Amino acid sequence: MSNRPGHPSSPLQTIAYALLAAAIGLAFTAGVYAELAADRRDRLEAGFAFDAAQRTELVREAFAHHGDALESIKRFFENSSGVTNGEFTRFASAWASVKGFRSLVWAVPDDGSDGNPPGGGELRPVYRVPTLDSDAELAWLGLSAVRSAVAEARVSGRMNASELFELGDARYDPFVALCLPVYAAWDESGVRRFGLVIGLVSLPTVSNALISPELPTGLPFSIRDYGAGPGAPEYRYASRIGAMPPPGHQYRRLSYPRILDFSGRSWFVEVRASTGYVSGVSSDAGPEFFLFAGALASFVLGFAVHSLSRSRARAEASAAAAGEEAELFFQLGPDMFMITELDGRIRRLNSEWTASLGYRVGELEGYLLIDFIHPDDREESIRVCRGVGDGIALEGYVNRVRTAAGDYRRVEWRARRAPGGGAVFVGARDVTERESMEERLRGSLVEREALIKEVHHRVKNNMQIISSLLELGSMDEADARFTAVAKEARGRIRSMALVHEQLYKRDSISSIDLGEYLRELAGRVVGEFASGAVDLVVDAGVVPLDIDAAIPCGLAVNELVTNALKYAGAGGRRASLRISAREEGGWCSVAVEDDGPGFPDGAFERSMAGATLGLSLVSGLASQLRGELRASSGPGARVELRFPLAPRGAGPGLADSPSDSPVGRLADSPSDSPSGRPVGAPSGVSPRS
């Protein structure tokens, strides 16, 4: 907050701002603490349920173990030809232990009955195993709970458990008696009588024996007869650590009740959590730490803790948003998207199929894609689909697909097999209009090329007409000087016309092959200007040259060849003429050399300075090409023209103004430098006049 100038905050305002910031920080911290505590409580409850289930399973296994022991003793009686007290003691003593029975007895009805009478009766112990039981008289056999269990076992013929009962020993109470009828056995007297194997189990002893080997977990539990009425005995196992949470405690509600059916009775087993168990599981002090840090650090730290507690939710929301984005991209993409099985059966489509081919989204699902391909394209399409199924990526394949209206459209396909290998991702695009447009553009381009070739052809013809007119004019003119000038002009026109002729003949409409051009140009110049035999050699490879450089280069070569024939073949002398052209590092080099008398001292410079039209024109053409001339003499003469080649695909050529054109250079001064020397003309060279 800001205050008006000159009015600083009062101490009360400063305290109020601090308290407000602290209150906001504490509020955020409290929210974070509540969420972390709830998460901890959820983890505690889940862990408690797991541990309590384990504890309940131990109780069930203990009951089952004692029942299996009595069944083994029963089989011992039934499978023995005779049983003595010693044999019974030796066989059954294995189960008379702290973890087992406190007493094991084989008893018979005192009334001497043989079988399962409906009533009860007194029991007379016949055999017993010396055990931990100090009751030598076995008075517990006469308890009503035991008598009831014996009666029910005799009636049912199956093992039966008594109700819980107490014998007055706090260390071992309560007890349960397991009674199992033994239908036939031979005793020492040789009499085969009905009896019962009865085992006395102390729940505290068994519980302690089972749980003591384990680490303390703080899980007390209770066992009671589910069918017994109020006030019936109940066994409670107290945990070795902790105590029961007091009333009102938030963890007092942790309870895991289960009903176990065993030996004709239902036992209610309930596992609870002690304070020791709660402390052990919830030792993570994160919520308390955040609460304390928020109180000290106020708003900033509290807000940071809140953000951290929400990180997992944000990550899940981000993942869900990413899935939604992918679905939106699939549905809103401008192309036709599809997911198919490996056999080409359509699984999913986006709505673009409706816009492009007229099919509803669900109309094609379940059908084979190949059924919608034009019959003439199916064989090739099947081969391509098999390649995609083998993991080969598909790009740019085009075939014809039937629309909902029954006609066929040209469709371009892209496909990839899914990383898992169970599906194929397909992208398609209707290219019917695009291919039609491309065909029209190709036709238009052919027409344009034909038109440009026709222009070059007509330009060449017009130059031929001009050359013919000059020739006709020179025939009627008696002035020999005019005739010579007209002849040189025809040669220059011919060199330009030859460029257009080459362009007309070639596939390219913007460049010519310099080597081919020089061979034809040199042949024509020699045929027209040579006064005697000429040994002509043209050494030129394939050097592409655009039209803007070809015309000035051709004019320059025409002048140099004409000049060489004029001096090297003077008086009908047999002349040797060599023309070479090559490309080096983006530069083109064209050289004309002869075996004539060479350049007299100062003649080349005078010619370049304007003494003669031919070499001054060559100098201007070199400037137009942004190149240079190099001349050497003795024996013969050699002139080299070097100029940079335009990059491939460059824009306009070298002639950017009228004065830069070949015709414009004829009207310009031949001198391009203050000293009157053409660009690139070396000093000290002796040119011809």
Image: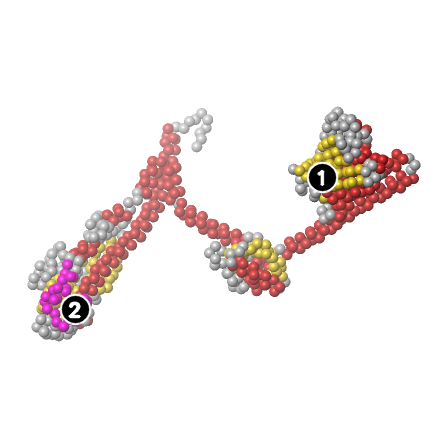
x and y, in percent, of residue 320 in the image: 45, 51
Give the residue at x 92% y 39%. Answer: 476
Closest to the observer, 630 or 49:
630
Task: Examine the rendering and report whether any part of residue 144 can be seen.
Answer: no
What's the residue type where badge 1 is placed?
Ala
**Would residue 399 be found to the left or right of residue 511 on screen?**
left
Residue count near mark 2 (Cα–Cα under 10 Å), binned few <14, some 14–19, many ≥20? some
Tell whether 681 sits left or right of 485: left
Query: What quarter of the picture does the N terminus occupy?
Result: top left
For the point 40% across and 42% down, the residue is 307
Closer to the N terminus: mark 1 or mark 2?
2
Q: Quadrant of residue 192?
A: bottom left
Residue 77 forms part of the magenta stretch:
yes
Task: Choose between 688 and 188: the one closer to the eye.
Answer: 688
Residue beneath the point at 17% across and 65% down: 70
Residue 9 seen in render: yes
Q: Separation of disc 1 and disc 2 at Cα? A: 119 Å
Residue identifier under label 2 = 76
**Relative image position of residue 359 (x, y in whole percent):** 57, 61
- Dominant secondary structure, magenta: helix
Disc 1: which residue? 581
Could you say which quadrant of the image residue 384 lies in?
A: bottom right
- In this picture, which residue range is highlighted in magenta? 71-97
User: Is 154 displayed left or right of 50 in the figure?
Assistant: left
Residue 541, image quadrant: top right
